[in-house]
Amino acid sequence: MIIFDLNCTHGHRFEGWFASAEEFDRQRDASLVACPICDDVRVERVPSAQVHVPRAAARDNAPPPCADEAEQRPEHGEVMSLTPEIVAKLRDIVRGTENVGHRFPEEARKIHYNEVPPRAIRGQASRDEAQDLVDEGIDFAHLPPFLTGDTH
């Protein structure tokens, strides 16, 4: 796997994992690569300072994580590196949600305004619907398709 640093036209920086540079180009050209923050498919590679460390060396020689390191959280708008372990945990969380599809804005409002019992939901909302939810103070997070299995 090759990890590329990517940037969308809105300036969001994130990383993507691909089998090769050609595979990245193929997926980008087919609009299969999207920004996890704004869902923009106009994505380009940016220079990366990452160094590849073979798995065995990383496992055997890596220093133990600091206690502080485990509790650090990314700041708002900061992109977090996703390890396969983190992706697996996120997928487990997503599997525990109810997919309400295009009813997401309606269901999120019902939960927010205590019209129905709270529950974990996921679904789709247009950019305008999402902005309306933000304006109403309703918290939610964009889920990239690789977590949900949804292909839009």
Image (cartoon, grey):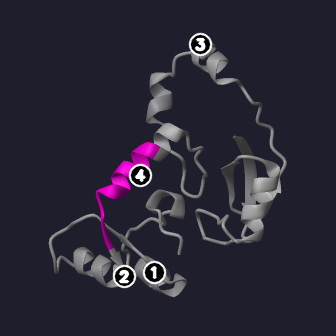
Q: Residue at x 66, y 67 (%)?
A: 32
Query: Element under label 2?
Result: helix
Residue annotated with mark 3: 60
Residue annotated with mark 4: 91
Q: Is residue 108 above or below residue 35?
A: below
Image marks 3 and 1: residues in contact by CB distance under 8 Å: no
Q: Residue at x 47, y 42 (%)?
A: 86
Residue annotated with mark 1: 125
Picture coordinates of residue 137 (x, y %)?
Answer: 38, 75
Query: Element under label 1?
Result: loop
Of badges 4 and 1, nearer the viewer stands 4
What stretch of residues is rendered in magenta?
88-99
Q: Main secondary structure of the magenta part?
A: helix
Residue annotated with mark 2: 105
Q: CA distance from mark 4 to mark 3?
A: 28 Å
Q: Residue at x 47, y 27 (%)?
A: 68
Q: Is residue 101 above or below residue 122?
A: below
**Category of crowding for the residue at label 2, using alpha-carbon neighbours closer than 10 angstroms: few (below 14), some (14–19), many (at least 20):** many
Q: CA distance from mark 4 to mark 1?
A: 20 Å
Residue 91 part of the magenta segment: yes
Q: CA distance from mark 3 to mark 2?
A: 47 Å
Say which label, 2 or 1, has the lower sequence index. Answer: 2
Q: Residue at x 62, y 12 (%)?
A: 61
Q: CA distance from mark 2 to mark 1?
A: 6 Å
Say which label, 3 or 1, has the lower sequence index. Answer: 3
Q: Is residue 144 visible?
A: no
Image marks 2 and 1: residues in contact by CB distance under 8 Å: yes
**Category of crowding for the residue at label 1, using alpha-carbon neighbours closer than 10 angstroms: few (below 14), some (14–19), many (at least 20):** some
Picture coordinates of residue 51 (x, y %)?
Answer: 77, 31
Picture coordinates of residue 103 (x, y %)?
Answer: 34, 83
